[in-house]
Amino acid sequence: MANREPASGKLAPEILEKTVLAYGGAKRDEVLVGPAVGEDAAVIRWPAGKYLVVASDPIVGADRGAGRLLVVVNSNDIASKGGDPAFLISTLIFPKGSTPKEITSLVEEIHEACQEAGIAVVGGHTEINDRYDHPVLCATMMGMAERVLSARDIAPGDAVVMTKHVGIEGMCILANDRRELLRRCLSDREIDGILQWSDSMDVLPESRILRKWAVFMHDPTEGGFLGGLGEVARLSGLGVSLDREAVTVDRLTLSCSECLGFDPLRLISSGVLVAVIPRRFLNEALGALEGSGIACSVIGEMVRGEGDVPVETKEELWGLLAEGRSLP
């Protein structure tokens, strides 16, 4: 009985050190106590005059690339508040039978994404659990901001700007995990092209450009682009007057939406940044984005009353994942 494999529980210390603790992301001087066997919490020296920005998100829809996506979606939440992501805490629960190689592979994804973004992994929890047949991934990201962006500061007449094109995250997940489904609509070459969109899922570059002018920014995740606009409306107590013709939809996303019968504006859209910008700063902000090679479009404005963007949330990804799962 003593040598029986545990059904649930934390990884053995020697396995934890090799598979998880060896991958700490970027080195940051602010981290005074980092993750180690026996350490209960991280200790971070916080710079004077900086605001602490905190966000937490799980990954529930993706399989391939889930470790990198875990970092990006949490980083994007910090960026949307005008902050720079700095410290990550991850909770990783693996199903019984997961091998050290499988655990290391996912943790390496997190490590590499954090290194690229200058983020330190400062703690977390990793275990095997027999209640799940699929990894459960969740992270908390902390970042630093110079000022506070609040929906309370949005005013009627402010312009609503989007970057890039809708559905980036959802299309990447489908290309990774439901390739056969997309083959109904696209060639393998086109699907491979969608996989490259993952490189543009980070909104930190446009956040750093826009934070000096924007009064509010938002990362439209579940519920897609329309869901994100509805959340801005709800937060601000105003409506959004939407110019649907100005919303950028890539031709591959449009082809798939017509072929498979879904609304691309309701497909999970990490990679798009929605920014609310006073009109007096709009031309300068757009020029800065375009000068940095970041596609952008003015898609509407904030108005008194309800506007024409519904506030309910509907996500198209779940139905598409279920449909793709039934394919041979």
Image (spheres, rainbow, N blue to C red):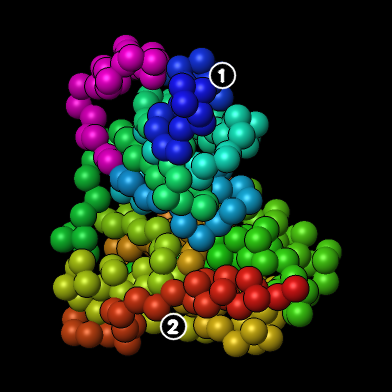
Q: Which residue is mark 2?
A: 243
The residue depicted at 55 percent of the width and 60 percent of the height is 169
Decide which of tag 2 and tag 1 comes sooner along the chain.
1
Say if the magenta span includes residue 42.
Answer: yes
Residue extent of the magenta highlight = 29-54
Residue 18 location, x and y as percent?
56, 19
The amino acid sitting under disc 2 is Asp
21 vs 317: above or below: above
User: In the picture, residue 294 is in which quadrant?
Assistant: bottom right
- Count neighbours of disc 2 (C-alpha within 10 A) and say few if under 14, some if 14 to 19, many if 20 or more: few
Task: Answer with left or right where residue 199 lies relative to residue 117.
Answer: right
Residue 17 location, x and y as percent?
50, 17
Say if the magenta span includes residue 171.
Answer: no
- Mark 2: secondary structure: loop
Q: Is residue 322 visible?
A: yes
Give the prevailing secondary structure in the magenta stretch: loop
Mark number displayed over residue 18: 1
Of 9 and 103, which appears nearest the observer? 9
The residue depicted at 75 percent of the width and 60 percent of the height is 193
Viewer-side label of 2, 1: 1
The residue depicted at 40 percent of the width and 78 percent of the height is 314
Of 80 and 213, which appears nearest the observer? 80
Mark number displayed over residue 200: none
